[in-house]
Image: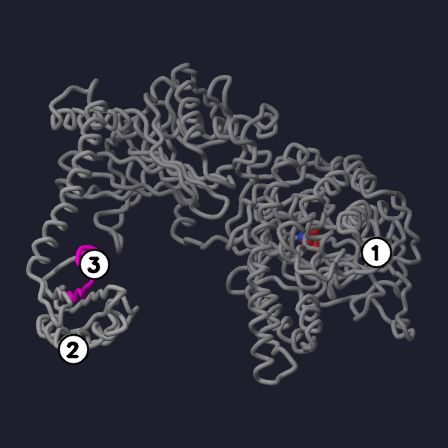
Amino acid sequence: MTGNEIRKSFVDFFKSKEHKHFESASLIPDDKSLLLTVAGMVPFKPFFLGEKEAPFKRITTYQKCIRTNDLENVGRTPRHHTFFEMLGNFSFGDYFKKEAIEWSWEYITKVLKLEEDRLWVSVYKTDDEAYEIWNKEIGVPAERIVRLGEEDNWWAAGPVGSCGPCSEIYYDTQNMGKNNEEADRKPGDDGDRFLEIWNLVFTEWNRLEDGSLVPLPEKNIDTGAGLERIASVVQNKDNNFDTDLFTNITKGIKSVLEIQGNENEEAIKIIADHVRASVFLIGDGVLPSNEGRGYILRKIIRRAFGAGSAAKQKVFEKEDIFLYKLVPYVLETMNEAYPELAEKQEYIEKVIRLEEERFATTLKNGTEMLEEEIQKLKGENQKELPAELTFKLYDTFGFPFELTKLILENQGFEASEEEFEKKLAEQVQRSKDSRTTISDMIKDEFIDEFFEKHGKTEFTGYLQNYEEKSKLLHIAKSEGISGYEMIFDKTPFYAESGGQVADTGIITSGEFEGKVVNVVKKHDVFIHQVEIIRGIAPAVGVEVKMQIDVNRRKDIQRNHTATHILHKVLRENLGTHVEQSGSLVDDEKLRFDFSHYEAISPEMIEKIEKGVNDIILSNLQVKINYENIEDAKARGAMALFSDKYGDIVRVVEIDGYSIELCGGTHVKSTGEIGLFNIESENGIASGTRRITATTGHKSLNYVNRLEEKIKEISDIFRTDEKNVVDIIEKYIGDMRAAVKVHEEMQTKLVKYEINEMLENVETVNGVKVLKRSFVDKNVDELKEIVDRGKEKMQSGIVILGTNNNGKAVFVVGVTKDLISKVKAGEIVKVAAQVAGGNGGGRPDFAQAGGKNGSAVKEAVEKAFEFVTEKL
Ligand code: SER
């Protein structure tokens, strides 16, 4: 069976057991506590915890997953991966242990046709129920069932939350080890003989923060079987990388890197694993960066690049980049299961290529550092590069140890692999310690209690409903904020969410008037922050009139609908890799962050702006519907939040143009938005761009302000708006001409000054000597005087000094015929020394300085005396 056939057979098998097949969710989970989708159950977390009702009681998936906690081991073992696929079946309050066990056995023995004698199982040490099912009903002999403890047979997605005992199915590879040392081993013991191929979790507990276990409202099943492992067993390979899931990719690596034979096994595994992970991460919208998921992507691309470099025994440069060439091989293998990747091929290749190029530059810097260190070793007569440095090269520059070692050895130096491994192990431990785990949202006990008693706040503020008569259910004076926190039975005030800010407005009741300054939502309970304008705060039970600031709300709505249009226009113009990564919508502006790898040209910005305005001017209707997510997706809805699976979702549709899942408030038709104006476009992180824009009144204000400015400018130039540009251009032309005249005048002035000076030169032994001291004279001007003086005198000496802001500067010139008698360098030295400085220079021209500007006059005199003596 091929990998594709295994996936299909699994899904078909569970479909025949009345499971609904869900497509693989994104690798980016909609769960802030989790960086990546690490297991098949992640998209269903809310169903396990009972936070949401599952749309189907039985679901099956093959889920793309990434785990990076063992990154350093990938390539070194037959089974470690970052990217892998998990086959799973899930029951939400439906079947439990018996069916889960029976079906897993049926699939493995009847569909995959694995030999029963080679299958072992483990159960949690006290789980007699599972033990009995395996032993009595399935018929697995007691000697092939082991009872294991928490470490092996208790599965939890994190320290708190849903969890339960699990039961694992193992395949006996019959690999007894080199000296038969694994002959007596069992699952759970050390060694590679037993391969865990399927984990059945009986999720029935919720672990609370104090460590105690409480039963979940329903008993659930979560199973996970690694596709790569199953394939290795079915295809009879003792290495996951030898299965057909990898053969095509491996072939690609060998051909692209021109590697022959069976060498470089580790590098090939690293590259094969990492290129798969990179393709899928980029396909799901991740871009290389220095934090979070982007950092993981950067790290694996670089590690793969380094592995290629080490395999070829050459520090790869820009012209050696190769990873991006492997993308087609990955797609060929994965196309059947993930057809959506094909659309993004070009984009994925581009992102990988750019990162490779960037890294090639880094490697170059690393090589330089290594060269410096080698020089140091030479100087200190050392042979071995310390492990701190080999590790730094690895960690900072991505140099594989083998590559460092190779460069060192080529020059007669060495590095200790053992020490390097030690550093690496420390690093692995550090990253394990800081591993992200799923943790429940911080519990707000009060809100939970409140919710139990009153349920959620009814939001009546959609659909132009701006006023409400509501009953006050809770009021408290809270610390840290001014005024009161109030909760009502219903409210027209939108609470901050999905990037849209909260409404503000007024609450009145009899003599009381309060200003609502913010509204937040917790567990669908709306908490209003109210400042008192007059009267006394009302008591619980009182009816109040709530009115939102309608104009402000309308401005917010304009910006929100414009954001949807912008999102679509960006995708149309830049490509479908554009995905929203953040959004802020208030009454002043909209701010939209999205994935894109380069700055957008001014022409493109203009095109995007025009695209949005065209949709606005078409005055399309905005329709709000509640529908099943599958239907919405089928209609092309942009679904950003994967956990809305199967729920009834709110769909905002700009008629015939865009469909998005969204809880925000919107205009009725796009014409209401008015003028859309992009204020700025810039990068906020590697691979993430930000556009800010305005609509409606704000854009109008902007245009008005522009008009005022132009009028002001026109007034200054005493013209009208039509002619202002021509007039300014003329002014600039005139100004340039005036500057030129000024410069010419300046030159003439210097000449005149020099002439005047030359009339007053002294003669020493028949030689003309010009000496002068100035205050605040430009040094270039002094040089000019020296040059022209020498030219005019034909034979003579010029000694000049100036006191510029308390500092002395001297410039001296001697015509060539006199330098045998006295040199400019000597003269300037005498002057400079008087002013607390020193200096020298050429025989015919020299310049020097001194600290003491007030000594310039005296210095020039001393230099003159020196000249007199010499002549
Ligand atoms: N959640 C379990 C695991 O990841 C079973 O799917 O192993």
Q: Are marks 1 and 2 in contact (CB under 8 Å)?
A: no
Whichever of labels 1 and 2 marks the residue nearer the N terminus, that label is: 1
Magenta run includes residue 855:
no
Which amino acid, mark 1? Trp
- Mark 3, secondary structure of its residue: loop
Q: Which residue is mark 1?
A: 134
Q: Which residues are magenta?
A: 787-802
Q: Which mark is residue 866?
A: 2
Tell me what residue is drawn at x 51 percent, y 27 percent: 573
- Furthest residue to the front? 766
Q: Residue 721 at x, y = what percent?
A: 19, 20
| Vertical arrangement, residue 573 with respect to residue 114, above or below | above
Secondary structure at badge 2 equals helix
At 88% across and 57% down in the image, what residue appears? 119
Q: Residue at coordinates 26% horizontally, 72% vertically from top-left?
A: 825
Q: Residues within 10 Å of mark 3 (few under 14, many from 20)?
A: some
SS category of the residue bearing label 1: helix
